[in-house]
Amino acid sequence: MKYKKSIILTILLALDGNCASLSLEDAIDKTLKTHPDMQIANLNQQSTMLDSKSTLSTLRPKIDFNANYYPTKTLVMPSAGTFATRQSDALHADITGSYVIWDAGRSSNRYDASLLKNREADSNLDEAKSTLVEQVIARYYTLAYLKYQIISAEQSVKFYEAQYSRAVNMRKSGLRTEADESRFFASLSEAKDRLASVHAETQKAKLSLELLVGSDEALDVEKEELEKFLSTIKVVKNADTLRGQLSENNPRLKSLKAVIEQTKLNSNASDKEGYGTISLVASYGYDDSISSYDSSQVGVVGVIPIYDGGKLSSQAQKSRIGISSAQKEYESREKILWQELFGAYSDFSRFDETIVAKMSVINSTQKALDLITGRYAQGLATFVDVLESRSVLDNAQSELSAAKLQKVAAWAHMQRLLNQPQNSIVLVP
């Protein structure tokens, strides 16, 4: 079993040494250029722009070419006070132009709504972008965090190897029992297993970042990047200002605001359906059946719906319900996002105290461990004292690096919710 773990560690360490270093800016840039989610958002934006152009066509004249040919057609003709029929082929062709000169503003309302649809698509694109940036930041600094975990695990392995060797020698000298030797060996095995586990987590985290970035080569992040990044990020000290920034900047809320305005415009258009339409119509045609002749007409056509079985009134009511539904969806989403933002803000502020506390624990525990280890070597302390001190130190080191990563994650989540650029800092106003 020992040899298998050694082989696994050797392979993982070899893999670690063959990784290309990657900056956060490069990782974000590559992700935004290659990730399918960004491509989907861009395609949706282009599709929405085309929908707006399609809606704009209703405000412009319409020209159609019509052609009909019948190999046989029954024609009716008056003759001596009676009607006679005759079979003949028939051809008709015409060009017809129409233009809606008045529809109570329905077409304008729907076009304006389509422009708001573009704004919604832009907000969705921003949301996709900010979400991917948050994911890159989280995965990027997870690799740096795991480097700290590897160092801590390696230190534990070296410590327990030394204690196990010492316990073996002291047992042979009659100064310690087999229990000391067995317990330190068990702790050494656990430390090696933890180190192998951290290496495995590192490989999974690297693969996750590589898939996100779209890179074919193995990527790596130096552990110093976590400390460097922590020294640059700040947030506002007044939480009250965050909610206003959330409402103003969050892509999801901006999208919902656009949906509300769209629904209002579409509702206005539905309310005007009963007013009818006035159109200008002109056509020029050619007919060839028994005789050939040209025909043309120019005029105004008005259409007013009288009875439609309740269809228009139902559509109008549905549109008004849609306005209320969109407004309530906005209010609900705003509360959920504000809860997320406040939670991230609270976590970000709290982790400063956690980091200071864990550093204090590490410093004091390291001194106590050195003292207890020396006392154990002199036979003045038990292996339980040594194991407890080392366990406290390992936990504190692990929790310190975890708190640093969680602080970065909380900041990145705030940046996503506030739709801030990846390199911006929310400063105190």
Image (cartoon, grey):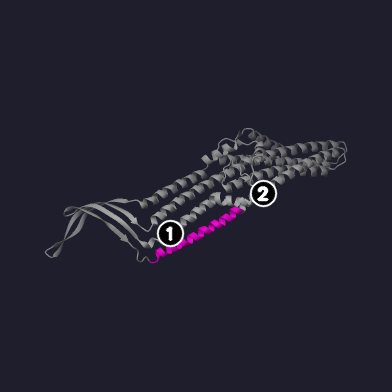
Range of residues picked out in magenta: 309-338
Q: Is residue 185 left or right of residue 39?
A: right
Quarter of the image with the N terminus in it: top right
Q: Which of 291 and 300 is in front in this view?
A: 300
Q: Mark 2 points at which residue?
A: 347
User: Which numbered tag is attached to residue 116?
Assistant: none
Mark 2 nearby-residue class (10 Å; few <14, some 14–19, many ≥20): some
User: Which numbered tag is attached to residue 268?
Assistant: 1
Q: Is residue 156 left or right of residue 240?
A: right
Q: Do the residues labelled 1 and 2 touch (CB within 8 Å)?
A: no
Q: Which residue lies furthest to the left in this view?
A: 80
* Residue 255 at x, y percent in the picture: 51, 51
Residue 365 placement: quadrant: top right
Q: Which of 47 and 56 is in front in this view?
A: 56
Whether residue 186 is visible: no
Magenta stretch: includes residue 322? yes
Of the two numbered discs 1 and 2 in the rendering, the one whose residue sits closer to the viewer? 1
| Residue type of the residue flagged with mark 2 | Asp
Q: Is residue 91 left or right of residue 229?
A: left
Q: Is mark 1 on a helix, strand or loop?
A: helix
* Residue 314 at x, y percent in the picture: 43, 64
| Residue type of the residue flagged with mark 1 | Asn
